[in-house]
């Protein structure tokens, strides 16, 4: 059940950030001194992932460039004796084996499309992780590691990461309905943006998943979702799997930070800055100064 390979989806258009994302993929927008996507790949490495497949779209070649070597820049920094910066640059591309796959533009829009795009890189009996490339977690134990650990322990066909939100926010998300069996949360269904209380839980679906290669049997049978703009969603696939196989959910300890819009991106920058010792004091001073003008 060991998981050492991950698929990261980075094929969105980032329309909420236009015009900034006209030429720069949303996943490369910075959180302080690193792009969002590098926080995700760093989490993968800390979780034992050695092979990282990044699924991109047409026009996102900057992502491939970012995870490639930059000898001209490294030489320049070496001549200026900035060895700490050289080490940072090399760490980006040396921490894992990176493979880039362009998502076929003929595929239906949705979270199952990256799985299809990377299919030839997943062997028949292989287990793998799946992550969104634009959301991060602040946690003592890497979020993906928590999900992988549950997957390996439970022997399930898939384990889906979950995050607990306040009850007043449940209606905004896809919410898990599950059954507690032998100290495991076994998935029953996902209710999208529930309108009626009581809610089945306040655990929402977030982009940290682990699968056996069996998931492809269900992706092949996954219909487009007419209630969601005919999107091709992996949620539909793993719910189909849950009807025949054991699929567990794993609540993640930590703080879930989304970068889906400019305000949340700003919030994430501040939260991450306060969590990083080299930025903490400066950001505290900044927030204190800003609060005087509110």
Image (cartoon, rainbow, N blue to C red):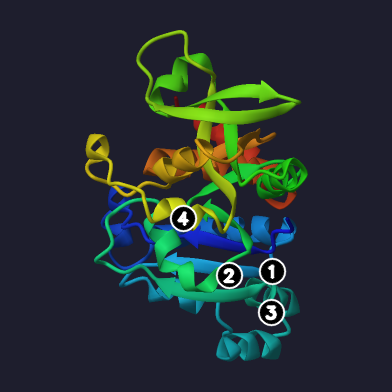
Q: Quadrant of the N terminus?
A: bottom right
Residue 217, numbered circle? 4
Please report whichever mark, 3 or 4, sits nearer to the chain's N-terminal start.
3
Displayed quadrant of residue 150: top right
Horizontal arrangement in the rendering, residue 273 relative to residue 262 (left or right): right
State if disc 3 and disc 2 touch (CB < 8 Å).
no
How far apart are the alpha carbons under marks 3 and 4? 44 Å
Residue tagged by mark 2?
A: 123
How far apart are the alpha carbons under marks 2 and 4? 13 Å
SS under mark 3: helix
Residue 86, numbered circle? 3
How far apart are the alpha carbons under marks 1 and 3? 22 Å
Q: Position of residue 5 (x, y in %)?
A: 63, 64
Residue 50, numbered circle? 1
State if disc 4 and disc 2 touch (CB < 8 Å).
no
- On screen, residue 203 above or below 77: above
State if disc 2 and disc 1 touch (CB < 8 Å).
no
Instruction: Please tell me which residue lies in front, 241 or 100.
Output: 241
Judged by depth in the image, the label closer to the viewer, 1 or 3, is 1
- On screen, residue 235 above or below 54: above
Judged by depth in the image, the label closer to the viewer, 2 or 3, is 2
Judged by depth in the image, the label closer to the viewer, 2 or 4, is 4
SS under mark 4: helix
- On screen, residue 14 above or below 201: below
Question: Residue drawn 42% across and 29% down?
Answer: 173
SS under mark 2: loop
State if disc 1 and disc 4 touch (CB < 8 Å).
no
């Amino acid at each position: 059940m060991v998981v050492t390979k991950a698929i990261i989806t980075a094929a969105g258009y980032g329309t909420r950030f236009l015009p900034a994302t006209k030429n720069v993929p949303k996943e490369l927008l910075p959180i302080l001194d690193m792009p969002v996507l590098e926080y995700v790949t760093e989490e993968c490495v800390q979780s034992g992932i050695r092979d990282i497949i990044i699924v991109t779209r047409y026009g996102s070649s900057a992502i491939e460039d970012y995870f490639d070597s930059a000898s001209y820049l490294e030489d320049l920094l070496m001549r200026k004796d900035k060895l700490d910066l050289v080490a940072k640059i090399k760490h980006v591309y040396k921490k894992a084996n990176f493979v880039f796959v362009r998502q076929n533009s003929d595929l239906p829009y949705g979270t199952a499309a990256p799985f299809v795009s990377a299919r030839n890189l997943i062997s028949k009996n292989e287990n793998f992780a799946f992550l969104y490339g634009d959301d991060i977690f602040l946690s003592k134990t890497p979020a993906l590691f928590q999900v992988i650990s549950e997957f390996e322990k439970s022997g399930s066909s898939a384990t889906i990461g979950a995050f607990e939100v306040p009850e007043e926010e449940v209606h905004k998300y896809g919410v898990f309905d599950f059954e507690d069996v032998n100290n495991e949360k076994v998935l029953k269904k996902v209710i999208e943006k529930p309108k009626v209380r009581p809610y089945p839980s306040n655990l929402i679906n977030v982009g940290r998943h682990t699968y056996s290669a069996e998931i492809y049997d269900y992706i092949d049978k996954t219909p487009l979702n007419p209630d969601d703009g005919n999107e091709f969603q992996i949620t539909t696939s793993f719910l189909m799997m849950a009807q025949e196989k054991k699929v567990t959910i794993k609540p993640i300890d930590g703080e879930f930070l989304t970068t889906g819009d400019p305000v949340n991106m700003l919030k994430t920058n501040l939260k991450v800055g306060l969590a990083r010792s080299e930025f903490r004091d400066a950001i505290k001073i900044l927030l204190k100064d800003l609060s005087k003008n509110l």
